[in-house]
Amino acid sequence: MLKSSDLSSNSYPINPWLAAARIGWIILLVLTIALFVQGINTRFGDLVQNADTRSLLDLGVTSRTLAIYVVSINVILISAHAIIAMIIFWRRPGDWLALLVAYALVSNGAIIPLSRMYATGENILTANLLFMIIAIVALISSINLLYLFPDGKFVPKWTILPSILWGFLAIFAVIFPHSPLSLTSWAIPLQLLMLLIVSLTGVYAQVYRYKEVSSPIQRQQTKWAILGLFAAVLGPLAFFVPFVIVPSLRVPEASNLLYQNLGPSFFTFSFLSQMVGLTISTLFGLLFPVSFAIAVLRYRLWDIDILINRALVYGALTGLLVIIYLVSVVILQGVFLTFTGRGQSQMVTVLSTLGIAALFIPLQRRIQSVIDRRFYRSRYDAAKTLAAFSNKLREEVDLNQLCDQLKSVVRETMQPSRISILLKAPDGRYQKIEK
Amino acid sequence: MSGFLKWMGVILGILIALILIAVASIYLITGNKLNRRYEIQVEPLEIPADAEAIARGEHLAKAVLLCHECHGIDLSGSTLDEGPMVATISMSNLTSGKGGIGGTYTDEDWVRAIRHGVRKDGKALLIMPSPWFYFLSDEDLASVIAYVKSIPPVDNELPERRIGPVGRFFVLMEPGLFGAEGIDHSAPRPPMVLPSETKEYGEYLANTCKNCHGDNLGGGVQVGAGLNLTPGGELANWTFEDFEQVMRFGVTPENRQILSDDMPWTSFKQLNDIEIKAIWSYLQSIPAVESAPETQAP
């Protein structure tokens, strides 16, 4: 599907089935946006009315501000998915798989915000039915992308079986949620197991393709798509367990006595962690449209290796800092308890935080160096070679030797098939030294 | 291919390893705390079964100890669900119905739970305000147990206590969650205080007030914290009638209606005249505490 020569081409023959599917996508897009717009006011009102006012008061935030924040996040999520889907839809008109990506983007981008508005079943029948359709499209399209991307074929062929199974389960889960065939009626561990099976077969399919079938371009696309596919798999997870993972944005039922007994900071902490979770999951969700847009439209737009490098460095850095912070808090608490009789001191937090701040830069440099040396050997060596060459430049006066050394450095660091050096002669003409 | 897969594997591996190490550290530290077992030899109490004692126990449970605030109107329990990442905490079903502990707890278990904040299995009860119940006299505690044992069974199966990683972090940082930790379990029993209008009896009753109004009853600055009840606070300008109006009707001298969710005056209105006078007398006698500038109204 996605050969580099095709990337800028729009001249695909449109068959009637594809045309019908494209019309279906337009209808889906319009319905999704209409449903979202229709539900915004109610959602905003719910958020204002049902906010955890005690935690908000503790944080000095109004419920209206919270509502604006949550709705804005939803708008960003839906808009990003819809806009990128429209670009793909427009740029790749003759491509079935691009259309599947567009379907997946529109429906998955809307599934979380719409589930907050319509999944309760308290709305009018039409709206609930439309939500069900969008949910089914989201569930089926996102998982099938794992099996079908990037050429639109089931590779290996047997992946059609989990695809069909998943389709049935998704339809039952949405339309007949209480049926024994519905995932939602199963025990949570069983639900997670099923999701794991489907996701892992999809991951296997992608690895298999990458290894056995894909062309170099498709492999590059797959790298980007895998990032998005992680987010795509989160779509079904988000549909089935959102109220488990982020149950907040509701009035806490704790009496003031319980609130005081447990401590306001517990509830505020809980509220904040849920807000952070909401924000991070939204940002993570944006990976889906962005990475697929790059994979489908312009796979060479950015260098994914840089992204992987940064993910390695900052992932390790964050994890290490968290561990150091926790360990330092525990140790300092013990020290303070021994010498002052009080383990809970603000001093512990301040000292731990200062320690973390002081460690950030040196640790980041150290990790960057280790990762470059371990995983980016060529880049690391190239950097070292260039540094050594620049030192030699200061000492070398013989032009021929300098040219030889330059060629040697370029060959070593860039490994080109040919090297030419153009030297400007005193008369203004260029002399070519080729090897 | 192999390079790419290696990178992805390493990224995932490092992240998962780091997350696992962090979570395991928290679980290890908090696990010790959550699973710590208290060996407490409780003093044997004779639990009465007469109607008068049960009525006394009911009165104390409803109007003084406020058991219903957490365990529900019929004491069949309730659940605080903040999600698996934070915590699911169940306030036990105290009846002998399905899911209740009433049928399994012995008299000693009840004493251990109410007075010492420790479960039947020896682990600490979470958010059980035993430090304030510790002062209950043997007679009053026996009456409360008699009442709890007399309530009709209610079937209500509650989820097990689950503390998620975020909640565990909070357990790590907040030592006051376990009432049992703040009690000297071997301390001698405080002297018995007979019901009267004295400040001593008022002090005995006002222990529960410390939950929201602070240990010195000087109020607090946190959201939902109670007023400064000392002579240095708002009560300095109140008369006994003002105080009684607040306790019985939830209406302040400024004619502001207090929500029962904020201050459980619907429970306090069941206090009898002697008890309200005793509490008032005690509040008048305690040292004045200067009000914090941003004290929240109850």
Image: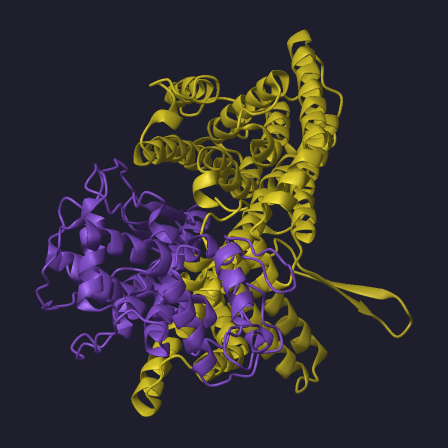
Q: Is residue B227 toward the left or the right of residue B90 in the image?
A: right
The hue in which chain A appears in the rendered picture of the protein: yellow
Q: How many marks?
A: 0
Residue positioned 44% across, 25% down in the render? A155
Check the image and report above or below for B75 versus A21.
below
Front residue (pair B235, B40): B235
Residue at the bottom extreme? A339
* Residue A190: x %, y % from top left: 31, 32
A327 horizontally vs B121: left or right: right
Image quarter of residue A337: bottom left
In this rendered view, identify the residue nearer to me: B152 or A433. B152
Q: Nearer the viewer, residue A329 or A267?
A: A267
Farthest right residue?
A427
**Position of A134 compared to A230: left or right?**
right
Rendered location of residue B49, percent (x, y): 13, 50
Q: In the rendered view of the protein, which quadrant contains the N terminus of chain A?
A: top right
Percent across and percent down for residue B120 are 15, 56
Q: Quadrant of the C terminus of chain A?
A: bottom right
**Residue at position x 36%, y 54% from top?**
B164
Q: Colour of chain B?
A: purple
**Vertical position of residue B201 compared to residue A243: above or below:** below
Q: How is the image coloured?
A: by chain
Do we see residue B14 in this rendering?
no
x 25%, y 35%: residue: B155
Residue in the image at 65% along x and 22% along y: A95
| Front position in the image: A92 or A235 | A235
x and y percent of residue A390 in the render? 65, 79
In the displayed structure, A258 sits above or below A113; it is: below
Residue B51 seen in this snapshot: yes
Question: Compared with residue A404, is residue A76 higher up or lower down, i.e. above or below?
Answer: above
